[in-house]
Amino acid sequence: MLPQSRRELILRTLRADGPSEVRSLADKLGVSQATIRRDLEQLDADGKLTRVYGGAMTLDAGDGINSGDVNSDDIDDPFAEVATERAEAKDAVARAAAAMVQDGETVLLDIGTTMHRLAHHLHGKRITVITSNLAVFDELRDDADVELVLLGGMVRRRYHSLVGFLTEDNLRQVHAGRLFLGTSGVRDDGAVMDTTLVEVPLKRAMIKAADQVVLVADGGKFPGVGVARVCGPDDLDVVVTTASADPATRLALQEARVEVVEA
């Protein structure tokens, strides 16, 4: 990753998570602590953040970031726009995933537009849904059959979600029988990727909070790319996708003993 791209990701992470330690930033970006320290020194010199003992924080007045700098909500596509991409395929995998859920289950739903479609197909089931997806919350809030648990965190308005260390802390206090996980793309070796850095630790915490992990991704995400690796195929139990999914990627998943369900 180029230094400028890495520094932009550091700013995005600090805006989302608040003050962070060097070690935490290094883990999230997959680089050495020495590299992070050099980046923080440069960003501090550029007036884009403030160094604190052991780490850094964004500046108070508007976080010190002007219109020419990077803001995670500016980079993310607006939720409504993303929802229209491959809408039919998303609905197909969402419907197939929802059919797996039986009355009495506790399920965890990830951030994203596919999860919103999945929630739509959960109406009428007597279940508990845990999520930080505000679109899922809005979809199910008036359904008397669904016990709804909303995880706390920092609001990303344009992507209808809650993220950050508070959300991750909340996830350590709950447990679900099944997680429905979203992704930006699946690499040809079966690795699950994401393009939004702030979501990666949240997805990893969700995986730890569930007995079974079901990746829900239409064929357009096979194979795919992303900024960061969320998990490998060994962390997945089931993948729900469409017939258009790349055959080589599907084979890699099956060789890792992941059940591949075609919607």
Image (cartoon, rainbow, N blue to C red):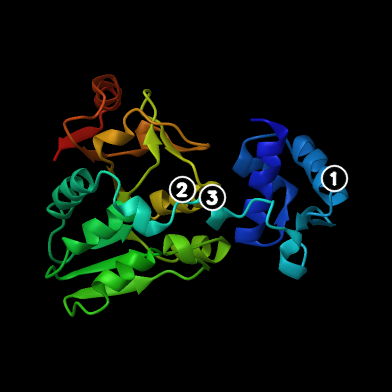
Q: Mark 2 or 1 closer to N-term?
A: 1
Residue at 78% x, 41% y is 39
Q: Mark 3 or 1 closer to N-term?
A: 1
According to the picture, the residue beneath numbered tag 1 turns out to be 41
Q: Position of residue 139 (x, y in %)?
A: 26, 70
The answer to which image quadrant residue 221 occupies is top left
Residue at 44% x, 32% y is 225
Q: Amino acid at mark 1?
A: Glu
According to the picture, the residue beneath numbered tag 2 turns out to be 204
Cα separation, mark 2 vs mark 1, equals 29 Å
The image quadrant where one finds the C terminus is top left
Q: Amino acid at mark 2?
A: Arg
Name the mark on residue 75: 3
View extreme (right): residue = 45
Residue sitting nearer the eye, 148 or 193: 193
Q: Answer few, some or many: residues within 10 Å of disc 2's Cα (few below 14, many 20 plus, some between 14 and 19).
A: some
Viewer-nearest of discs 3 and 2:
3
Viewer-nearest of discs 3 and 1:
3
Label 3: state its secondary structure. helix
Evaluate whether residue 110 shows in this view.
no
